[in-house]
Image (tube, rainbow, N blue to C red):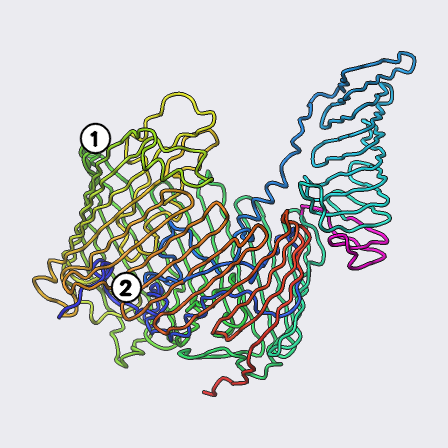
Amino acid sequence: MATNPSFLSLIYSGHWKRQSRLGVDRPESGNPESGNSIDRKDRVFRSRSRCLSLGISVRSTRQGDLCFLLLLPALLFTLMVGLGCGSPAFAQVVPPDDDYLFREDSDDRQQQLSNQRERVMAAPTDKKEEVDFSAPTVNFDQAENIVSGEGGVLVSGQGFRLQGERGSLDLDTNDVKLEERVLLTGEGTSIQAEKLEFNLETETGRFEDTKFTLEDDAFAFEAKEAEKLNDRDFVMSNCFLSTCSCPDGEIPWKLSGNEVLAEREGYAHLYDSVFRFKGVPLFYTPWIAFPIKQERSSGLLIPEFGYSNRDGLQAKIPIYTVLDGSTDMTFTPFIAARTRYGMQYDYRQAFSQRSSIETRTTYSNETPRDGRLRGTDITNISEPAIDDHRFGVYAKQNWSNSPVSDVPLSFVSDIHWVSDTLFLREIQDSKIGLPSSRYATSRMAARAQLGDYVSSSVIGEWNNSLITPQNTTLQRLPEFTLDASRSFRPFGFNPYGLKVAPKLSLNGVNFQREDGYDGVRFDVSPSVRVPFHYKNYFNSDATVEYHQTYYDLDETLDPFSGGELASTNERGLLRFDYEIRSAIERVFDLPEDNILTTLTSIGSRNQMHRLRRVKHTLEPKVGFSYVPGTSQADLPLFDSFDRIRKRSLFTYELATRLLGSFDYLQGGEGDIEEFLADVDEYETLDTLSPLTDFDTGSALPPTSFGVPLNPPVRGTKLQRELASFRVVQSYDYVEDKEDLDPNRSAFSDVGAQVYLNPTQDFGFGAGTNYNVQDSDVSSWSLASHFYDDRGDSIRARYSYVENNISQVEGNLELILNSRLKLGYYARFDELESEFIEQQAALRLSSACNCWHVDLGFTDQINPDRQKMLFRFTLTGLGDLTQNFGFNNNNNQRIPQQ
């Protein structure tokens, strides 16, 4: 019996790549042989464990080098819908993340904390230059020209504010003296003291029994005596420093010194220093210095040290260098004594707002390992190799001239290159490439706008194959495109939007590879598009497109069949497409205390806005695509463009959505504004995308579901999507009547997708492809996230593709009590009945989150690694990490070819 094709295969045709257990690989441009299936063990390489080095590492939480990998939480069930390797099936639902076991460690949360530290001091300051002195009781000594007060003195001026119980101001010298509960506030600084002598002109002074903060509360000092020498420098005696203080006044940890020299946006030098935790002295040093700055500066970053029974002694020593205000670089020598040693070099420069470059180059000398695999599985890799001298390169560059230039130009490069096929699996670096990658692909593109109607581009693409043989991998070197388009209104401006939009496209690609046919493909494609709409009832587009394609081959041998192709060939192909779409909507006012308003208000994070109105839409769409038959069997197969099959394809779809309008509860006044009279003002589903893309989430903007369509401003309305449902199918009349392919049905699977997101704390999505003819579900997937007010959370995904994928991935975070929480991440393969990866960590925090201790464990099967983790973190200072490895020694070598 004929099997139903997927919706995607009815729209497109030609070479289709087989699905790996991770999912359907995206068609690699110019690489039809990339359809070879991947061994199941290769799925493991998608896990991006950062706990590769065992041992002690100290990481600064201030310099952005938080690489908390194992203490980071996630109970991940890996769903990789067979619709795009690595793409989340539900971008609208918060996905699992194996990089962070605890949400508080995520980059987003760290950025929020950084933004808080950058706030200006809350105390108001006057912008005028004169000084004001006020107090309930004011006295003036005319002879000395000194004003004094008591009962609460306030002295304020440009950029500062001083207050105390009593004090005086010398109007000649601008010297201020204050006593009892003294507070000085200014931009980036807050000083408390029992006694103060301060000059307002020089901004210098002395303090007794003082407490103060620098860098917007990021660093706190307390001293018996302190002196402010200038705007930047402080000298203190009998002082201690900490980055942490609790609301009850407790300071869990601190560094003390008999004398301290501190410089804003510089360093604090402590002499005769003792580190105390919970009042217990832990170590002593005659001198110590560390940065008290938020701005970047050159220096030695926190190194990492460790030991593994497989790799021996391990160390990384990053050295950070600021070259100027827009350029910096990092050198990171590293060693794993039994396996490798080398250097990582990072370079970053911003030339202007329209021009920047970022690069990373890694060199690793692998001679100490003597060719041993060290637990890496090489099954189904055609050319496994470990070079003695390994290189990995990442480079990203963007450049454009002024958009108002006579000829707007832009250049983009995205380089990913490795010297051998196992580099990314053993030296995991997400910038250079993911461990699950089939190719390390480099692209460069230059584009130009030639007047108002003509544009051109030149693109180069190099594919570094990591699975299949490199000598049969196709490269695009280069690809040239020239487009010319313009619209005309032969019927004038009319209420139907009727116009004619002709376009001419020229495309030429030079395909190259070592073995097998290659050469030039040149395509000339004129087309005409005619849009039409009737009032607000429907919109439509009709497009006629013709392709005249020429082939000129340098090599003619087919590496797969062994046959020879003609050195020159051509194809003429006509295509007609038509689409009509409409939308029906209705807006409903909601009464107070209705069930929908109640549901959308559950949880503390959903109390600022209240659902007042909902909008329900029905969005039907019908499309037709016609391609007459043409001979293509003798053409070379560079990519799917070379096989566009005969078809008369109807695609019909219905989408429905429920959108909510929320009023801000605090301070909102006036009537409710009209909630979008025109449905076009809403973001709508990209219903032109094939179902495969639809299931991967790419048919919707990644942040469109369950989040505001536009980020709300405090005190304004909020609009977001609460629910959506979509169903789509295709019918091929030609296939039904002529039965061109006995393995293909005229009807595609029915694709369906539903999303629910009543609150910010809960989201759910589901998608499926259903074979109506065989009454069989060919694929389905689920995803969900849930947060509660305690801080518990779960993020999970499941993916199933018939005879191919059945995987679960998820994060779980449980609050056991106010100071103890559990983070867990897992990825499980149901077909193999094994965990691909697991991570778990238990975190014990202080009462006011000034420190925490993590005890964790990680286990992954490829490469085979099991580790325990101990990490002690002082908030704002860094963390101390110890890893313990339990890897079995694996001295297997790569087989000789």
What's the magenta region? 268-295
Measured as percent of width and height from the top left, residue 70 is found at 56, 63
Which amino acid, by three-letter code, is at mark 1?
Answer: Gly
- Tell me the distance, in whole angstroms, between the alpha carbons under discs 1 and 2: 40 Å
Q: Which residue is mark 2?
A: 640
* Mark 1 Cα-neighbour bin, 10 Å: few <14, some 14–19, many ≥20: few
Towards the viewer: 667 or 33: 667
Looking at marks 1 and 2 on the same chain, the residue that comes earlier in the sequence is marked by: 1
Whether the magenta-drawn stretch holds residue 41 is answered as no
Q: Which residue is identified by label 1?
A: 492
Would you say 146 lies left or right of 886 here?
A: right
Occupied quadrant, residue 659: top left
| Residue 717, x across and y down, in percent | 41, 31
Above/below status of 499 relative to 809? above
Q: Secondary structure at mark 1?
A: loop
Whether residue 446 sits left or right of residue 250 in the image: it is left
What residue is rendered at 44% in x and 57% in y?
96
Q: Is residue 487 visible?
A: yes
Task: Between residue 504 and residue 172, name the one nearer to us.
Answer: 172
Residue at horizontal 44 percent and vertical 29 percent from the top: 665
Q: Please, what is the dominant secondary structure of the magenta stretch?
A: strand
